[in-house]
Amino acid sequence: MSTWRPFLSSINTFLKAPVNDSPSTLETPPPTTKLRYEADHRFAQVLLPVMAIIFGCGICLLAWGQLAGLYLSIVFGIVVAALVIQILPGSCYLEIDPEKLTICTQFKARHYYWADVKELGLKNLGYFEVVGLRLLPQRVKKYGLKYPASKGEWDIMINNRYDLPSQELVKQLNLVRNSMTTQL
């Protein structure tokens, strides 16, 4: 497993969005309008041709009478369809506004109101960092979750596929959340 580490870290470095060297705007007051971050589609754009080739191989195998071609066609056809949907404009975004946080993945938007968010932070999942939201215990069922997360875990995790580092995203989200909770 340790032999995969350099390979995965080089892919992660290749697919990372370029770092913005401009001065941080986090010291400015929180926005009064919506901030919208579109997802970075480079990973899906690299993966799509590979999956399409495997899908095509499955079609060829099926045409030659091989039953394995049916399996390849179904599985990789679904993967190709999911990747195409992910690449479409407006399918994946993160929207921060003074009242709520909106997370949209494959055209399904979920809204989390700042009054219901207890805490924000980072979680390290091996090679990737995700942004975590902990909701107030009495508000967990409002968002379709059965139980509040256990200690040290997050109720909602946001896979950071946007054009800013995870630490900057957490700072921006905390800035907006803190300004909203002080106004309440």
Image: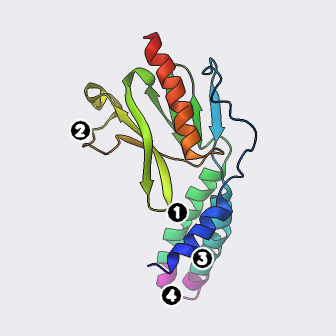
**Dividing the picture into quarters, in which one does residue 45 lie?**
bottom right
The mark nearer the N terminus, 2 or 4, is: 4
Task: Look at mark 4 in the image and give the residue it sits on.
Answer: 66
Residue 67 painted magenta? yes
Nearer to us: label 2 or label 3: 2
Q: Quadrant of the C terminus?
A: top left
- Amino acid type at image mark 4: Gln
Nearer to us: label 2 or label 1: 2
Task: Look at mark 3 in the image and give the residue it sits on.
Answer: 54
Quick one: which residue is furthest to the top in this view?
A: 183
Predominant SS of the magenta segment? helix
Task: Look at mark 1 in the image and give the residue it sits on.
Answer: 78
Task: Look at mark 2 in the image and give the residue it sits on.
Answer: 147
Closer-to-camera residue (3/86): 3
Residue 130 position in % (x across, y down): 47, 49
Residue 158 position in % (x across, y down): 48, 44
Disc 3 + disc 4, Cβ < 8 Å: no
Residue at (51, 18) in percent of width and height: 179
Disc 4 crowd rating (10 Å Cα; few below 14, some 14-19, many 20+) is: few
